[in-house]
Image (tube, rainbow, N blue to C red):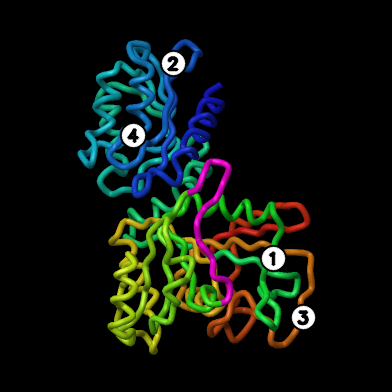
């Protein structure tokens, strides 16, 4: 039965994705005499952590109970008091942890505090699943950089658009729904200038749960994004990542529209992507979904800045020497140097195939 309770805690944790950042998405379940008496997941920043929500719901029934939590409880003061002390004073007798908190302020110390409070702890139930839920948090809290997912849809012959730049639609409805779910749980969506000029996307998340507006980041080295671009329009925030080559009048125009203009020193005449990601990390952006185009994706791969790849392959052939490919950039000189993904996952979405994997 223990694994069933941890599975339920993982399901709860997923409900926090998209709203908990920059905090981790955590689920907690309190069980007394084989019955769930309290459960919860991380509330938006400043709100209660999952453990506190579950303990509050359990009330006096927490005394003598067992807690299942997907991440080691915090033991320090942040936006909220430490969860470890609340667990100890509640009378919980046993805590099952899916994984330790990678935050250097917590790593192992939360578990030590619980055991010092005479609470038995068990570590590792469904640890890989828990790690995947908080992969963005883990990278952010240990490096200060956001977790970068490269996403693209392509034909069987690797094209993302025809020679006339027509790209709508390569993927089917199921794939597009999946992308909106991916957008829902990310902090920022990033695209290059050409994607804005050719597709004029909104870059919002539209799901059955409603509409969410991650930060929209446009990489535009010279400030050529049209002010009428849909990605700059309400609702939601927009950021133009540019260089000192942008004209002041255009930068002021973006600012007057409510968009943030982030001016970075150029790298080979273009936006320095490493510095851009570091700047986003300072803004507590823990995850970035990069949706094209090929030049931006290629540059990120060339620089080793991509953590995860999400590809949708449609059963169509586009052809054409001048048709657009998914990933451009410098690339590699030999097949031996090609980036080979790890922890591959393959899913069928109608007639489309989705392939995901990690670069590290």
Residue 60: x and y in percent read 33, 11
Q: How far apart are marks 3 and 1 (CA)?
A: 16 Å
Residue 37's disc number: 2
Q: Does the magenta stretch include residue 202?
A: yes
Q: How far apart are marks 1 and 2 (CA)?
A: 48 Å
Q: Distance between the residues labelled 4 and 3?
A: 52 Å
Give the mark toward the camera: 3 or 1: 1
Q: What stretch is highlighted in magenta?
A: 198-211
Residue 319's disc number: 3
Q: Name the residue under label 4.
A: 49
Give the mark toward the camera: 1 or 2: 1
Check if mark 2's residue and mark 3's residue have beta carbons within 8 Å: no
Give the mark toward the camera: 1 or 4: 1
Check if mark 1's residue and mark 2's residue have beta carbons within 8 Å: no
Q: What element carries label 2?
A: strand
Residue 214: x and y in percent read 43, 55
Residue 186: x and y in percent read 46, 54
Q: At x 54% / y 82%, what residue is drawn?
A: 329
Q: Distance between the residues labelled 1 and 4?
A: 41 Å
Question: Alpha-carbon neighbours of circle 2 within 10 Å: few (<14), some, or many (≥20)?
Answer: many
Residue 169's disc number: 1
């Amino acid at each position: 039965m223990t694994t069933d309770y941890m599975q339920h805690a993982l399901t709860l944790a997923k409900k926090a994705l998209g709203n908990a950042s920059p905090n981790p998405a955590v689920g907690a379940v309190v069980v007394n005499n084989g019955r769930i008496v309290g459960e919860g997941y991380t509330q938006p920043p400043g709100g209660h952590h999952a453990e506190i929500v579950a303990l509050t719901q359990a009330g006096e029934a927490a005394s003598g109970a067992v807690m299942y939590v997907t991440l080691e409880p915090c033991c320090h003061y942040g936006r909220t008091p430490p969860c470890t002390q609340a667990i100890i004073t509640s009378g919980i007798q046993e805590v099952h942890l899916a994984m330790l908190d990678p935050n250097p302020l917590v790593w192992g110390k939360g578990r030590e505090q619980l055991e010092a409070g005479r609470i038995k702890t068990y570590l590792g139930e469904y640890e890989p699943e828990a790690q995947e839920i908080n992969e963005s948090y883990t990278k952010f809290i240990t490096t200060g950089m956001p977790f970068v997912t490269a996403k693209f849809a392509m034909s069987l012959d690797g094209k993302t658009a025809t020679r006339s730049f027509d790209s709508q639609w390569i993927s089917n409805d199921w794939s597009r729904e999946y992308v909106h779910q991916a957008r829902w749980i990310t902090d920022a969506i990033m695209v290059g200038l050409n994607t804005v000029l050719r597709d004029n996307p909104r870059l919002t998340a539209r799901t059955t749960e409603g509409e969410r507006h991650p930060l929209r980041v446009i990489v535009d080295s010279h400030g050529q994004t049209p002010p009428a671009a849909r990605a700059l329009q309400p609702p939601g925030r927009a950021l133009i990542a540019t260089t000192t080559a942008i004209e002041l009048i255009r930068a002021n125009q973006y600012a007057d529209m409510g968009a943030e203009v982030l001016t970075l020193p150029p790298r080979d005449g273009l936006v320095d992507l490493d510095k851009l990601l570091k700047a986003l990390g300072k803004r507590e952006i823990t995850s970035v979904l990069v949706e094209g185009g090929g030049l931006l994706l290629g540059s990120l791969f060339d620089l080793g800045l991509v953590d995860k790849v999400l590809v949708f392959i449609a059963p169509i052939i586009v052809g054409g020497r001048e048709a657009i490919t998914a990933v451009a950039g410098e690339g590699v000189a030999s097949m031996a140097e090609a980036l080979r993904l790890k922890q591959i996952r393959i899913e069928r979405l109608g007639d489309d195939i989705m392939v995901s994997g990690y670069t590290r």
